[in-house]
């Protein structure tokens, strides 16, 4: 199994839920009061003869008009048209915007030959939720044009690829566990979005159920130690991937 980080950039996001590019070298956080600052790291995984994308970023383009996600996949040595599965944790815009892209004044599937895999409750909730975190025009287009597979609860998509219904960040958020003969790769989406969230216990206001997310981070962190998971951190700043260990005082550390 091979894992590639498809870093889409660093952004600030305020109450209006608009993601504005943020360059830590030239931009000052003081100029964007009330904002959160995040990195966006979709992932590409070569899993046997399958090519997987784990969440799709914002779907932003570079200065030449090319989708950043596509550009990074090609840099990794692959073709976006060869992606077999797009595995979604949830459908907030910063994770789902890149499922489609704008082309010739219209909308196109970013991965036209892929099967998009989404938790059924998340899909249904996205259409009825009034939050601006969800962009229903994307889901309408997917419904008409994409190959969609809806999964329920926790189970195996195909041998070695497991979806884990977590809730926490959204009511039907899910994580993914990929396993072959040599490796176990865990993608926690926004339940385990960055290493720093392992280092202290806190309840996040941006979670649907912050206490549950906190408890899940602890649970997944300890399982990652014992089962030697390679963890993928979608919003990781210091690290996008890493293995978790317990320090001398029982504190998590990511190496």
Image: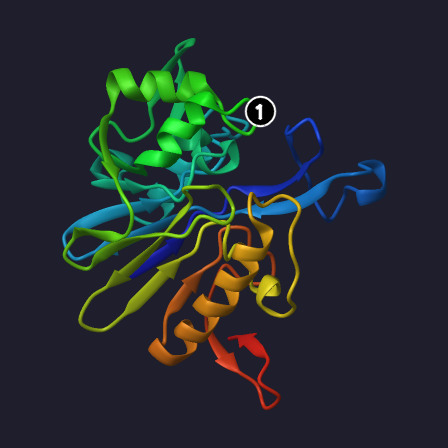
Q: Is residue 190 visible?
A: yes
**Which residue is situated farthest in the right direction here?**
30
Q: Mark 1: give few (<14), some (14-19) or many (20+) Cα within 10 Å.
A: few
**Which residue is situated farthest in the bottom direction here?**
248
85 or 151: nearer the viewer: 151
Q: Residue at x 39, y 44 (%)?
A: 89
Image x and y of residue 145, in percent: 25, 18
Q: Is residue 223 above or below residue 10?
A: below
Q: Please state if 189 lies on the left or on the right of 201 as rendered.
A: left
Q: Quadrant of the N terminus?
A: bottom left
Label tally: 1
178 or 204: nearer the viewer: 204
Q: Secondary structure at mark 1?
A: loop
Q: Residue at x 42, y 29 (%)?
A: 125
Q: Is residue 1 visible?
A: no
- On the image, which quarter does residue 137 sit in? top left
Q: Please state if 154 lies on the left or on the right of 127 as rendered.
A: left
Per the image, the residue denoted by label 1 is: 132
Image x and y of residue 49, in percent: 14, 52
Q: Is residue 19 above or below residue 225?
A: above
Q: Is residue 208 above or below residue 242?
A: above
- On the image, which quarter does residue 231 sit in? bottom left
**Which residue is situated farthest in the top direction here?**
105
- On the image, which quarter does residue 82 sit in? top left
Q: Residue at x 39, y 35 (%)?
A: 122
Q: Is residue 148 above or below residue 203?
A: above
Image x and y of residue 29, in percent: 80, 44
Q: How is the image coloured?
A: rainbow
Image x and y of residue 6, in percent: 43, 47
Q: Please state if 121 lies on the left or on the right of 158 as rendered.
A: right
């Amino acid at each position: 199994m091979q894992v590639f980080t498809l870093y889409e950039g660093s952004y600030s996001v305020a109450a209006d839920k608009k993601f504005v590019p943020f360059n830590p070298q030239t931009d000052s956080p003081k100029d964007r009061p009330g904002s959160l600052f995040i990195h966006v790291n979709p992932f590409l995984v070569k899993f046997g003869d399958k090519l997987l994308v784990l969440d799709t970023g914002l779907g932003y383009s570079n200065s030449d008009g090319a989708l950043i996600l596509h550009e990074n996949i090609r840099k990794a040595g692959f073709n976006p048209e060869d992606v077999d599965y797009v595995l979604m944790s949830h459908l907030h815009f910063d994770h789902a915007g890149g499922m489609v892209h704008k082309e010739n004044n219209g909308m196109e599937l970013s991965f036209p030959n892929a099967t998009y895999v989404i938790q059924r409750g998340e899909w249904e909730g996205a259409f009825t939720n009034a939050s601006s975190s969800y962009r229903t025009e994307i889901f309408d287009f997917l419904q008409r044009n994409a190959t969609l597979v809806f999964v329920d609860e926790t189970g195996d998509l195909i041998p070695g690829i497991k979806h884990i219904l977590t809730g926490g960040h959204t009511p039907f958020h899910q994580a993914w566990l990929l396993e072959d003969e040599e490796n176990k790769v865990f993608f926690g989406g926004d339940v385990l979005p960055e290493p720093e969230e392992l280092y202290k216990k806190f309840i996040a206001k941006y979670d649907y159920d912050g206490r549950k997310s906190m408890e899940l981070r602890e649970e997944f962190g300890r399982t990652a130690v014992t089962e030697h998971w390679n963890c993928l951190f979608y919003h990781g700043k210091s690290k996008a991937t890493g293995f978790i260990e317990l320090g001398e005082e029982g504190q998590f550390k990511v190496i």
